[in-house]
Image: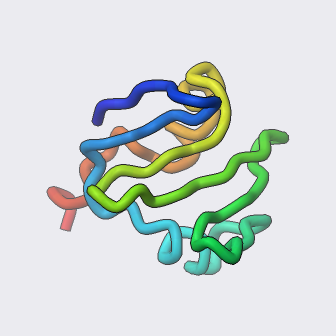
Amino acid sequence: MEYFSENNKVIVSGVEDFDPRRIFQCGQCFRWDEDADGSWTGVAFGKAARVELIGDGSFSVSGSTEDFENCWRNYFDLDLDYASAR
């Protein structure tokens, strides 16, 4: 996984099987709503974020790199290789 900060978003690449629709509609995530543009807005651990697929297997999470490291990286379990766990 690689990521960098740009325009108050963290752009993440190198994560397989990240599909916001499947994640947020699975019945285990709550407080996430799909926006008209296909992005998702939600709250976890007292932090609000907007998640958006970019289209090249990458996605963005709104906020700072610090928020990503301290909240979203773990929340989305991005360090686990789900493709190899099948």
**Extreme residue toward the left, this view:** 84
Q: Give the quadrant of residue 29.
A: bottom right
Q: In this figure, which colouring scheme has been used for the structure? A: rainbow
Q: Is residue 80 left or right of residue 71?
A: left
Percent from the top left, x then y, of residue 33? 74, 71
Name the spot of residue 83 as percent of width and height, x first. Answer: 20, 60
Q: Position of residue 49 (x, y in %)?
A: 70, 47
Position of residue 63 in the picture relative to residue 48 (left or right): left
Relative depth, front residue between 14 and 82: 14
Q: Which residue corresponds to the image point at 48% horizontal and 76% vertical from the top-left?
A: 22
On the image, which quarter does residue 34 sit in? bottom right
Q: Residue at x 79, y 65 (%)?
A: 31
Answer left or right for 30 relative to 81.
right
Tally of marks: 0
| Drawn side of residue 46 relative to residue 23, left or right | right
**Residue 45: image x %, image y %?**
77, 42
Residue 60 to residue 82: above or below: above
Looking at the image, which residue sits at the far top? 66
Residue in the image at 58% along x and 40% along y = 72
Against 79, residue 23 (above or below) is below
**Residue displayed at 32% across by 45% down:** 80
Quarter in which the N terminus is drawn: top left
Q: Residue 26: name its quadrant.
A: bottom right
The C terminus lies in which quarter of the figure? bottom left
